Amino acid sequence: MSGNKSIGVLDKTIQQYRLGETREVIDTNGWMDVYKYFKVVDDVDIAVGMDVQHTDTPGYVTPDRTGGSAILDGAVTAPAGVADAFTGTFDVSEDERFGWFLISKGSRVVLKTNADGDIAEGDFLMPDAAVDGSCNTMAAGSEQLSYASATADDAAVGGATVAAILERNLG
């Protein structure tokens, strides 16, 4: 762990830190958030709330579930991290490929869903296998993929996002 170092201004087009490096940041409410530095591969822009998966190359992540780089172990896994408001968005057409992703948060986070409107408050969430960077209700037998629990119904916020608590450290 790198301690309470500031992340500072980030140029997402060049590698500025060691891939896999972590940083702790105290958020505006006094909660400690932990971020990990990754390289983004594939041509899928990343919006706030999207999760990313590890690829077969250490330190590389992708939000692409439908035909991008080889996802680690050839299947959807628990996320490597989540893009939050601090992380911001990634426009890969502008070569924005490097950045910090949230791996631990003491308070709520907003996650992108697959927009089917079936997430209920209290549901455990896992990465959706078909919709890039999104989550869905955990399927039976997929407990190892669960990474968050919904604190509200996704229909309450239009079905495209859900408020949640990260249930374990990612990364």
Image: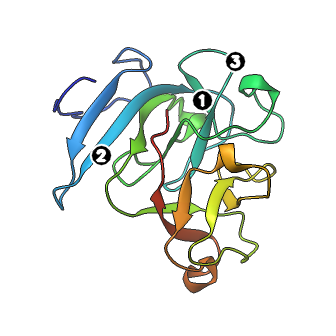
Of the numbered discs 3 and 2, the one sitting upstream in the chain is: 2
Q: CA distance from mark 3 to mark 2?
A: 26 Å
Of the numbered discs 1 and 2, the one sitting upstream in the chain is: 2
Residue 134, compared with residue 158, is above or below; it is above
Residue 167, compared with residue 170, is above or below; it is below
The x, y position of residue 1, in whole percent, is 28, 24
Is residue 21 shown to the viewer in this render?
yes
Residue 34, compared with residue 54, is above or below; it is below
Is residue 70 shown to the viewer in this render?
no
| Residue carrying label 1 | 61
Of the numbered discs 3 and 1, the one sitting upstream in the chain is: 3
> Mark 2 falls on what kind of element?
strand
The x, y position of residue 41, in whole percent, is 63, 27
| Residue carrying label 3 | 56
Q: CA distance from mark 3 to mark 1?
A: 9 Å
How many tags in the picture?
3
| Residue carrying label 2 | 33
Whether pointer 3 and pointer 2 mark residues with C-beta atoms closer than 8 Å, the reply is no
Q: CA distance from mark 1 to mark 2?
A: 20 Å
The x, y position of residue 8, in whole percent, is 21, 34
